Amino acid sequence: MQSKASKFGKFYLIFIFLLLYIPIAYLIIYSFSKGTTMANFHGFTLKHYQDLFADKRMLAIFLNTILIALLSSLISTIIGTIGAFAVHNARKRHTKQTLLSLNSILLVSPDVIIGASFLIFFTSLSVPLGFWSVLLSHIAFEIPIVLLMVLPRLNEMSPSLINAALDLGATPSQILSQIIIPYIQPGIIAGFFMAITYSLDDFAVTFFVTGNGFTTLSVEIYSRARQGIDLEINALSGIMFIFSLILVLVYYFIESHNVSKGRKKNRLEAVE
Amino acid sequence: MNKGTKAIFMTPYILWLGLFVIAPVGLIFYYSFFNVQGQFTLDNYRNFFASGTYLAMTANSVLYAFLITLIALLISYPMAYYISKLKHRDLWILLVILPTWINLLLKAYAFIGLLSRDGLVNNLSQFFGLGVHHMLFTNASFILVAAYIQIPFMILPIYNSLVDINGSFIRASHDLGATTYQTFTKIILPLTKPGIQSGVQIVFIPSLSLFMLSRLIGGNKIITLGTAVEEHFLTTMNWGMGSTIGVVLIISMVIVMLLTNTKKKKRGQLNAK
């Protein structure tokens, strides 16, 4: 009976995995089609990729997106790590709880609310909408996830490590740079990668605060997709798929080299 | 580190909390009391609760989010269960995560092709003799596409809670003569409840506000609160009304969190032991 169940299980897994990947495969397959719609494959061509690379506007948008992702992840990783210290060092249980709840507000809020409230915020401070408002928003919504990635590492660090360092005459800055930072580094890296993903994946918040002149890939895809099928978008998705694949592999590589299994599990729990 | 340097060190984080967490939420509440002319008024709330459209929209949003969450849960639980039993489960779960790294808009765009008149789904349905259907721009397609996008987010927390189950509980239950079914309902299901709850939380709240999907797949109708907020902020520029709907969304979000968080404390206690 059990083997039968697992046979069904395997069938189910294959079926759902197919469902998960068919839309992505469909997009990429049609990026090589000679036709102009995502129906009836018309033969192989690389034309859409050539169009994409020749499209100066698209290239600029792509670079914008990457720039925003890298800059915002870098800054949010720094601030998020500081935040993890703040939560970790909070003496009172109540303060800690409050900080954690405030931290999670941006994680659980619907994108529309974050976008709308940031739009009000920027306009009332008369920050011009464009690169800076998008960058600031991305930093803002990436900070809480970085904090959640770093905090478990800080919590599991034994205080005796620091006491030992103090006994051996280390200065506070030495303790920070030689003991604490190396110890929490896997959390910081994981946070940085999560931040990049959040930034690349965001559409709604950017859509609200982007104004007229500045566009990221998501917003551009949205406005093009509203006009209908354009196989250049398919070519773009092919490239973005490869890009995410590389990111995942790099992340997985760093992860498996840095973190022992038990610790990894802890971190996943923290994300929950 | 003395107190002074510590305070300077913490400044960026505290600034972030104040400027980007507390201030925006405060501003949404503040704006919800003003009309288009910038006068203080309670009209927005009166409009919201007096007009059938907004109440119907709220009911619709909750219903859609509920359906999306339910479909995602029904598909994801067995998925997580079987993956947790596989040999290379770390690798397989990575394959579940991978689609989430693909931009949401691209996935939605794929469905515009898949569900179109000559798309793959209609080809298949024709092949099986079911005829051609008009699928794009219907509410059903909106729900299905949203569920598709949310499935990985549902699988992950359930999978994590399944992997966390101590294997000796299962062995003990079998030793004590429980059938597979009993073990599942009495041991596995209760122990994965926290995973289900966080999955529901992760899926339900964003589903309340998927405005881009209802624009692209649902056919440009304003059917959910999310689309209404977007409409008021970016098209009709009635920020007051938009904020009012936003406040309603925030409140419903808090309710969902309270409902799904009740058991979390217990879990903390279990872990503490």
Image (tube, coloured by chain):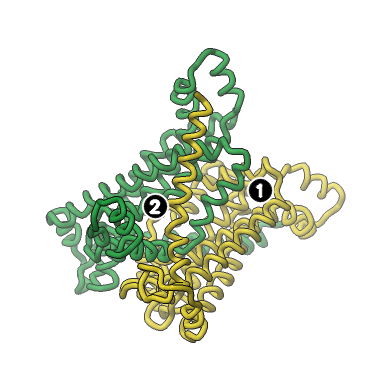
Element marked by disc 1: helix
Q: Residue at x 55, y 73 (%)?
A: A66
Element marked by disc 2: helix
Q: Tag 2: residue type?
A: Tyr
Q: Is residue B27 visible?
A: no
In the image, A58: left or right of A176? left
Q: Chain of mark 2?
A: B
Q: Position of residue B213 (x, y in %)?
A: 33, 61
- Front-lying residue, B125 or A264: B125
Q: Position of residue A87 (x, y in %)?
A: 58, 50
- Front-lying residue, A85 or A34: A34
Q: Residue at x 66, y 48 (%)?
A: A153
Q: Is residue B272 above or below residue B212?
A: above
Q: Which mark is residue A70?
A: none
Q: Residue at x 49, y 56 (%)?
A: B99
The number of numbered badges drawn on the structure is 2
In the image, B216: left or right of B3? left
Chain identifier of the green chain: B
Q: Is residue B159 above or below residue A223?
A: above
The residue labelled by disc 1 is: A153
The residue labelled by disc 2 is: B148
Q: Is residue A30 visible?
A: yes
Q: Chain of mark 1?
A: A
Question: Disc 1 and disc 2: Cα gap in Å?
Answer: 33 Å
- Front-lying residue, A127 or A1: A1
Q: Residues within 10 Å of mark 2 (few under 14, many from 20)?
A: some
State if disc 2 and disc 1 touch (CB < 8 Å).
no
Q: Are marks 1 and 2 on the same chain?
A: no
Looking at the rendered image, the disc whose residue lies closer to the viewer, 1 or 2, is 2
Chain identifier of the yellow chain: A
Q: Tag 1: residue type?
A: Arg
Q: Position of residue A145 (x, y in %)?
A: 54, 55
